[in-house]
Amino acid sequence: MARSNGVSDEALLSQPSDHEPATLNRAPSSYNPLSNFALPKGENRHYQQQFADMYFARLAQLKPAVETIAAESFEGFEIAGETARRVERVLDVRQGELCWVVGTIYMELPLKPNILDDIGKEHWIAAPPPRVKFLTPGGGDQTMLEDESGRLRLVGAALEDFVLVTGAIISVLGTENSDGDFEVLDVRVPDLPRQPQRWEREDGEAAVKKEAVAKREKAGKVALVSGLGITGDEGDTLNLELLMEYLLGEAATEQDQQETATVSRLIIAGNSVNAAPVPSREELASKKSSKKYGYDSSAYNPAPTNRLDAWLAGLLPSIPVTLLPGSADPTSIALPQPPVHQAMFPHARAYMELPTSGLVGSFDSATNPYEFDLDGWRFVGTGGQTVDDVFRYVPGDDRLEMMEAMLRWRLWAPTAPDTLWCYPFQDGDAFVMKECPHVWFVGNQPKFETMLVEGPLGQKVRVISVPEFHETGEVVVLDLETLEPELVKVGIFEG
């Protein structure tokens, strides 16, 4: 086990000492979950409505913010004596007139999956492998700007300076050329919304109740991990046991154990289990089985969830845990993903919230995405599907640039519902950012990366790319006072 700041291996191989180690107590934390991504329950949750309404709702929610920023930037802009004017609708753009207009980006990509093509094909044709990128080699892709009136094709070298994907709400400045295309000169996005002050929610509740604000102790740290990839096999247990020993303070040096005691919560950001792949249609069609009723071991393997449940039950008496689902976890694949059901945790669910208590339990099985307050800071986390889908639309592989663009678009899932499955919201797009978080973490990414994104009103967002633990053995530990992350690597080292 090694920490990113470097701990000598010899420190772990010292002879027994008569020194009596101090009793360590885990640092407490203030944890308040939010239900912004909770789906309607019972009869209120249905899928008869059209997905197109999501785009109209998203445009209505973000258009005022984009117009305000665009007006500040484009009002009075002149080229060759012509002043730019605001156009209300896309179809009101006139050829040769300098103007700016707000709309929704739509990317016309021939390699993008098309549900109509899938329906038109034979049902038993093997599906093509998933594409790494939707971009067409050598060009051929088109960028459109649309609203309720129609679409306008965007062209121009200025587009290459901006990250754009389907679903982003932007304002473009330019003029329509003789071909009917809009030559873009500049682009504006909604940018970061208002960011609440630290402890704003807690202090506000205390003010409403006319209670004095209690003195707050120095905050500890939070551990972020993703992609545990538990299969239930014996071969994947060692690193998990080492991770448990690290979090419980049972491993490493005394100094490391003191550091571990400051970790007040563990957050697991998706893909905790790695079940067997779903059989293909050819395999299901060719499968001959006499079993008609009852349990079929080829359709469900309980070992991964049983192992995860036992692992969590070993942690929860010492450290609270928040569990976000991912694409491989046993819950709905459509965003926002509902929490993994408590029936999957016969042992760990003893630490969950009681339905009638109104208290937050030590074990919080959450949605994906998920928003919560931790020691006064606003956190938003995802299992990684939203960033992975944006990656398919843009050239390059700079994940931090994509995450920053999503923040400035104010969208947690810009490509939903076009190429990312989601619930068809009607009254408003739940993936529109209402308030700017202080920390945004994304699980199941290729490597650990971090940056600080700053907004026009002084907002500062700590963005963290959390790697897959079963591939890297890495855990991100975030200081809840400075919001500075530290990387801890867990594993067996040779030499």
Image (cartoon, grey):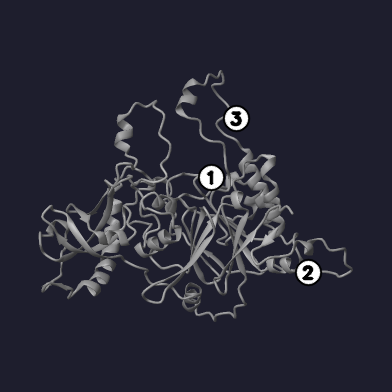
- Residue 318: x %, y % from top left: 69, 60
Q: Is residue 200 visible?
A: yes
Q: Earlier in the sequence, mark 2 or mark 3?
A: 2
Foreground residue, 85 or 176?
176
Type of the residue with mark 2: Thr
Sort mark 1 into few (<14), some (14-19) or many (20+) by Cα contacts within 10 Å: many
Secondary element under disc 2, as helix, strand or loop, is loop
- Residue 428: x %, y % from top left: 32, 57
Q: Earlier in the sequence, mark 2 or mark 1?
A: 2
Distance from label 3 to label 1 (Cα)? 18 Å
Which of the 4 image quarters holds residue 94?
bottom left
Which of the 4 image quarters holds residue 104?
bottom left
Sort mark 3 into few (<14), some (14-19) or many (20+) by Cα contacts within 10 Å: few
Type of the residue with mark 1: Asp
* Apparent side of residue 50 relative to residue 398 in the rendered image (left or right): left
For image coordinates 15% across by 70% down, the residue present is 84
- Residue 402: x %, y % from top left: 41, 59
- Image mark for residue 329: 1
Reply above or below: 331 against 144: above
Q: Which residue is mark 2?
A: 23
Sort mark 2 into few (<14), some (14-19) or many (20+) by Cα contacts within 10 Å: few
* Apparent side of residue 355 relative to residue 417 in the rendered image (left or right): right
- Image mark for residue 297: 3
Type of the residue with mark 3: Ser
Q: Earlier in the sequence, mark 3 or mark 1?
A: 3
